[in-house]
Every structure is written in structure tokens, then in C-alpha cells.
Image (cartoon, rainbow, N blue to C red):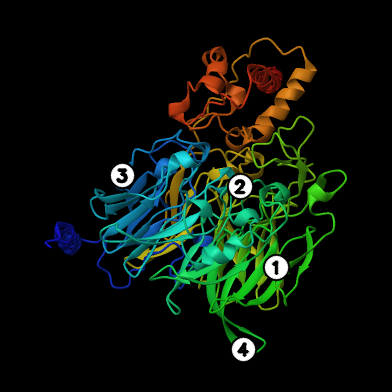
Amino acid sequence: MFNTNSVVAHFSSIFILLAMLQAQPISANSKDVDWPQHGLSHMEQRFSPLHQVTDRNVGKLRLDWYMDVPSIDDGLAATPIIENGIIYMTSSFANVFAINGKTGELIWKFSPGTTSGASFSNSWSSRVNRGVAVSDGRVFVGTPDCRLIALHATEGTKLWEKQTCDPSAEYSITGAPRVAKGKVFIGNGISDFGARGYVSAFDAASGDLIWRFWNVPGNPEEGEYENEAMGMAAKTWADGWAKNGGGSAWDAIVYDEEFNQLYFGTDSSIPYNPQVRSPGGGDNLFTNSIVAVDADTGKYKWHYQTVPNDAWDYNAASHIILADIKISGKKRKALMQAPKNGFFYVIDRKNGELISAEPYIGVNWASHIDLKTGRPVESPSARYYKNKSLRADLTPSLIGGHNWHPMSYSKQTGLVYIPAHELKTSYYINPNAALGGVMFDWYGNDLNKDKTDLKPEVKGKIGRLIGWDPVKGKAKWQVDHELPMNGGVMSTAGNLVFQGTATGSFNAYAADTGKKIWSYDVQASVQAPPVTYKIDGKQYILASVGGGGIARFMVPLYGTGKKALGPSRLVAFSLEGDADLPQLKKISNVVPEPPVKPSSTELVKRGEQIFEEAACGLCHGSVAVGRRPGNTSVRDLRYMTPEVHSQFKNIVLGGAFRPLGMLPFEGVLTEEDVDALYAFIISRQWELFEKQKVGKK
């Protein structure tokens, strides 16, 4: 039979090849060095061999160019990819940019026309995108409304588009695709609201689906399990399936060339209370796991579960690094991860055997990891739902000891550099909570009396950069940061580690000692990891500036300093740079005078409870405190205008702002609930308004 699809795909490939041959790279210098993949190579080590900039001359590093990112200013979370001297990166709503790596000039911009409001997951995650993959003249990006799109690398035009998941079913995509062997690999999220996670492989040229691996078992009454692995996992769930989904692979995906395996880290599941989620127990595979599958077929190879029967959202979706390291005199093919649970894992990537697991921060939910069984030895009181008080105060926090911010591994020093934080969370049962019947005190006891900032004694003690020795299983050095949530990390052959901070500084440290030897004020919080590349003999250090993700929305007091509110931009440094950042434009942060103060203290307290139960804080900041009222897609509610006040109930219950991503809570909240919620928000606005009046005096 004549296959028209094959013919179209064939001619499309020829067209792309010709375009690639005709396209002139920015520089033809054979000594140019790009950053072609998410972690520089498939090993995801984020270590660059470039050494023009070293620990001896980094003090001469200067700004070479900068570019303000032309989009809604939700911050940046993406790793820039550099191919042929062109920078490819994303901002919120999966906007894609191609930028001249030598000058910072915009070459093209692609907007996928992302739709928000299909579900809570889709709405929240629209504000976060961690980047693209680039291969064979194509740029691949995942969108929050569940599309995988291939673009022409030199023109920015769409080549193909595939729907990879259903945004109305609480799916979304925030992670960067990975590409290898002619395949594009992509996961999805967000398990916290019921998505059943899976990883898919698509043909890079045509977009055809090649295989799909489901991470948790579905309902057996709707058909047989998809494969033997799901049948195995089903035995670890009550009734043989994950009724509320789970196990989304929303970030870490790594291809291993040596074993032709794909590794990915998975999320937890809801309800967070295991007695409700899976009555009678069970490990609940493959949640909170590192899973290895055959890269060609998606067939299960092995798994390692960091937290069986999780109750704390200690997922294992964080960055995964591959390396060959010598342990006890023997060379091991290692996989390394510092997941949220606070232990640093070294695993044999050939077969999943646990080699070591040591705490990289203070941990009290478990005493240690049993190396024989691979299981954590839990503290007796960690499972809050079994305590008389139905509560537990635990470290790490719900945010984890390490979140999504990428690590780096240097072959020169043998150290892994971890952007870490040592925070506590109070877990307690609340059947009304949106997140699985469990409530969390996001900031713990870290806030000042009026809940507008961290206590002075807390600052500088809960955020750090750790130089971790994976062989000895301990830190060689650590640097304390003022705030806990800071940027991803890159190391180089110049004995340097680069990292941006929540307080707006971009720093260089000696990779062997951790000594800070250079710093630059980039005017805004940094959460994304830096990269480095070389064009025409010049090495550039590139930072993505502007705090994105949970550091901006959920917990801005942890991730966005008061003096780090500048715009989202790319900032490139070199030893020959002679540019300066412009003076910050003053942000209009005048608080509109709110309506009459609520007279009922009880109503305000009830509203505060509803604010947390309904998970309003995921977008508008826990305790209703944001960091920036400017050009962002999610506003600090303390700056509500009279127009918003007048239609507040219609916004919350009627969906007046649904096109902007604000979902209606009709059927979830009553009118009385909304009255209480409104009273709480007005009370927060009054606090800020009165502070502003005092400041003017």
C-alpha cells in the first residue's frame, strides 16, 4: 500500500537537512564549544571542559551583554541550550526564543498559544517551563497544555505537534524534553492533583509515538495492565491500582548511551495520607522511584524506590547525574541523586543496586537507609497519621532538602555540588485540605510576627550550596546562603562552580574549597542553572535571571529577596566584557486602599484556614504574601484593585478570570467560605496599606 505519511516524512526530512546546510552558524570557528543538551551531555553532569575563565582570573569577569526576555515576567527556570552559537530557551507559557549567543540579539520567538484554565495543574504550571531539547535542526518543547512541539531550529516555524496528555485531567508539562537516538522523551505532571504519570518516546522526525511507560497501575476493570511491570506494581497498591494516579516524571529524564537505558525520577501520589490512598499498606510502586527502561522499547529494566509508601511528598523527581566513580577501589557505573527526602543516593545504574545513601542535610524522618534492604529506617513518630496528635514536625520539609534545581558533578574534584535547603514542615491531618487530606505549614516557624518576612535569626542558616563527596558520603565544604531557595549549579574545568542566589547575586566559587571568589549583582532572584559556551575564542558564562516557579509563587519569602525583584533577562559574562546593567526601573507597588476592615477576627481566621485548605497559596503565596505586583501572570492579592474587589465572588465562584488561569471554586467553596476568604485577604491588604502609610510619613 502506498504510504503517503512516509513520503511526507521523507520530504520533510530532506527539507530540514537542506535548511541546515544552508543556515550559516554564528561562527565557523572550529574551536567553538556549545552547550547542546540539558546537562551538557547525556551524563547530565553539568561540568564544562572550558577553562579560559579560571579561579585565578575570574575576578576579571565582566558583563558582556544582556537581553530582557520579551514575555510576561514570571521568572525563568529553563536551562539554555546552545547549538551553533544560537541560544534556545523558554519562558513561562512555553514561549521559545532563539538568541544570538555572541550579541544577545533576538533571532526569533515562537509562542505556542498555551491555553490555561483546563485544570488546576494546567493553570498553575503554565508559569513554569524548564527548557527545550535540540537535535538535527529541530527544537522540541513541551507545553503546559500537554503538547510536544517540534520547531525548525533556524526559522522557528512549527514542524509537527502532538498531544501527549490531557490538560483537563490534571496533566501538564513543565520539564524539558530529552532527545537521543532519533527519539524525543517527555514526561508529565502533576501527581499532586491526580494525574497518572507516564513517560513517552516520540519519533523526532515525524512525531509518531514509539512507546509509553506508565509509572503506576491503572484500573484493571478497564482492561489488562499495559505491561508486566504494571502487574508487578499493582501488587503494592490496595485493590491493585492507583485510584488517584501518581508517579509523574515531571523533571529528571536521563539517557545512558552505554546501557541504552532511560532513567527517570517519579513523583508521589495523593491522598498524601497512605491510609486513605492505599488502605492496608503497600509500597505504591513506582511512586518516589528511579525507574530504568530500555530506551528503544520502553521495557522495564529495574527500579529503586527512595521512599516506599510515602506520606510526605518526598518525591524522587530531582536531577539525576551519571558518572563512573571508584568506590572501595572498584570502578562503578553510578547514578547519583539527591531527592527531596534528604539522603544522597549512589546507585549502580546497570542493575539498580544501592551502593550508598547518606544524609546531605539534617534529617529526622528516618535515621538511615538500610543498605541491605535499600529501605529507610523511619523514625517512630514520622507517620503523623498514627500519632495521637495527628501531627509531626519533620526535616526535610515538603519542599525537600533539594528540589528541582540542577546539581553538577566535577571529575576534577570528584564532588557533586548540591543547591540544598534545611527546612522543617509540620504535617497534620485535615480532611478538608485540597492536597490529599493533609496540611502543611509551608514556612514553619521561620516567619516574623506579621508573616511578611523571615525572622532575622533564620536567614543564613537554612539555605546552602554543598560540595558533596559521593565516595566518602559526606560534605567536603558548604556555603550558607541568606535565603534557602537558590539557583541550579554549573562547574567548569577552571576549578569553578557558578550559582545564582535568591538575593540577586551571581557567584563563582572555587570548586575544590567552596571559597567565594567573584560575585555580580544581577538585580533579580536566580533559580535557573547557568551554562557556558565559547564563540570565536571567547568563553561566555550565561545566567538566566528572574526567579521562577515555586520560589516566586508558593514560597516567595524563601526564593525572592526584597532587593532581587528585577526583570527576567539573560546575562552573559566574559573576560572581555565592558557592559553594565541598566539602573532598575522603579516598580509601582502602591497598595490601593482596601474596602472597610473586617470587624470579625474569627471570620479572618476562618478565611486564613480556607486560603490554605483550598491551596490558594500555591499560586498566590503561602500566608498570602507575594514578592512582586508588576507584570506577572499571578498577582500578589494584597494589591487588589477596586475593580477586582467588586467582582471577587464572581472570580472565585463564577470563573470570571478563568481565561487567565484562575479556576472557579464553585462546588468546592460555599458563598460563606468566600466571604471568609475575602475577609482574610482584605486583612492582609490592610496590613500592607497601613505599613505603606507609615513609610510615607
Q: CA distance from mark 1 to mark 3?
A: 42 Å
Amino acid type shown at disc 1: Trp
Q: How many tags in the picture? A: 4
Mark 3 or mark 2: which comes first in sequence? Answer: 3
Compared to 273, does 252 lie above or below?
Answer: below
Disc 2 target residue: 502
The residue positioned farthest toward the right in the image shown = 388
In the rendered structure, find residue 300 and report the number of the disc placed on it. none
User: Helix, strand, or loop for circle 4?
Assistant: strand
Q: CA distance from mark 4 to mark 2?
A: 40 Å
Mark 4 or mark 1: which comes first in sequence? Answer: 4
Disc 4 target residue: 330
What residue is at 56 percent from the left and 78 percent from the top? 351
Q: Nearer the viewer, mark 3 or mark 4?
A: 4
In the rendered structure, find residue 109 and report the number of the disc placed on it. 3
Residue 184 lies, in percent from the top left, at 36, 61
Q: CA distance from mark 3 to mark 4?
A: 49 Å
Residue 597 lies, in percent from the top left, at 71, 12
Viewer-proximal residue, 367 or 561? 367
User: Left or right of 572: which side holds 100?
Assistant: left
Q: CA distance from mark 4 to mark 1?
A: 25 Å
What residue is at 72 percent from the left and 13 percent from the top? 598
Amino acid type shown at disc 4: Lys
